[in-house]
Each structure stands twice: as structure tokens, then as C-alpha cells.
Amino acid sequence: MTYLINRLWPLSIVGCLIPFLWLIFDITFDNLGSNPIQELHIRLGDWSLRFLWITLAITPIQTITKWRGMTDYRQLFGLCAFFYATLHVLGYLLVDHYFQWRIIGIDILESSYIWFGIIAYFITLLLALSSPKWAKKRLGKTWKKLHRFIYIAACAAIMHYFWQLKGNLADPLFYLLVIFILLGFRGLVWLKDRQLAQLMLPKSTK
């Protein structure tokens, strides 16, 4: 099993970079369509969400398969979600507004959906900064509590995506369905653990 994990690791890194290289290729050869800026935002945002969803799916997969070797992959996919989210934010700041902070400030105040994007990105930033092993050791029990905020980031990202679209809502609705499934699985596991804990409590004798 360790040999398999070591073989999959470099392939996983290459796979995570393919969307970025594909985007660079399309930018270089002007393949982003009639509205390249919008296409750039959508593709970077989509891949950030996809990697975030893959990160959230690791725990259910580990629970079902009993394969604990996926923990490192969860960190990898989480960092990839942060990487594409950062590119998404930089695209907004640089490509859209050329770092004109006055215009950016007005846009943020007038656009409610941006606030959800800020919340989602701020959480993913904190999770990325706390992902190294030394940070996990330093934070102790707080680390696990902090990383549970990933579900808030996921919900905020969905709202950010949903509110800014005026046409086809199929993609955000699909992402919303996925997060409901993942949250539902998390809830079932929590209920099961709680029931087991209650069964293990010693019964009082009268």
C-alpha cells in the first residue's frame, strides 16, 4: 500500500496542475472565447470549487474504505483549492481592475456576492497557512476545530457563485447538491459516533 501511495503522489501533483497548464495554453493561443476575462474567472473559480469538493470527499472515502493513506492527499487537494482560489482573486484584482483599490472598494460595497467570496477565500487562506505539520502541532486541538470551517468556506463559495450568475444555474446547483451530500454524510457519522458514545457510558444503578 505504501508503494502505491508513493507512485500515485507525483501523478496526483501533475494532475492537479493540468487545469492550470491548460488555462495557460488557452490564454497563449487566445482560446478563451468572446469574453476571455469572464471565462478566466469562471474556470479558476470552478477548479477551486472542484478541488475543495475533492478535499471534503476524502474523509467519507477514508471512512468507507478504511484507507488512512489519503490524509496527505487531502492536504494536497486543499492546497490546490487555495492555489486556484488565489489565482481567481488575483484575476479579479489585476485583470478586472488593475489594482485600482478605490474602484475595487466600491465594487465590493455594491456587490453582495463578493462578500461571500471574501469569506470563502479568507477561510481557505487560514487553512492553507495552518496545513504544515508544525502548524498542526502548534495549534493542537484547535487545529481540528479550525479546519472544520472548510464547510463554511464551501457554503460561502456556493453563495458567491450562485449570486453572481444571471443565466445557467446548473453548475452552482450541482455543487450545492454535492455539498449537501457531503454534509449529510458528516452528519450521519456524527450521529453514529454519538450513539456509540452513549452506549459506552456506564449505566447508573439504583
Image (cartoon, grey):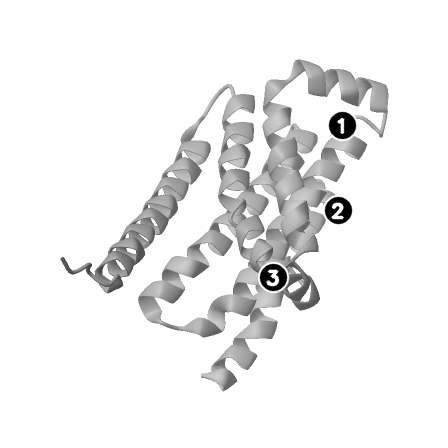
Kindly identify the residue that appears in the image at 78 percent across and 22 percent down. Answer: 104
Asked if residue 204 is positioned above or below residue 118 in the image, the reply reads below
Q: In this view, does 49 lie above or below 202?
A: above
Given residues 18 and 117, the one toward you in this image is 117
**Residue 13 placed where, x, y %?**
61, 66
**Residue lying at 60% horizontally and 39% vertically, measured from the top left:** 45
Q: How busy is the neighbourhood of tag 1: few (under 14 within 10 Å), some, or many (20 plus)?
A: some
Q: Where is residue 33 in the image (x, y as percent from the top left)?
A: 63, 33
| Circle 2 residue | 28
Q: Quadrant of the C terminus?
A: bottom left
Give the left or right position of residue 113, taking residue 65 as reference: right
The reply to whether dot 2 and dot 3 touch (C-beta < 8 Å) is no
**10 Å crowding of disc 3: few (<14), some (14-19), many (20+):** few
Give how far apart the Cα atoms at labels 1 and 2 are.
Answer: 18 Å
Q: Compare marks 2 and 3 and give the one earlier in the sequence.
A: 2
Residue to which mark 3 is pinned = 140
Residue underneath mark 1:
96
Point out residue 21 in the picture as x, y percentages from the top left corner. Answer: 67, 55
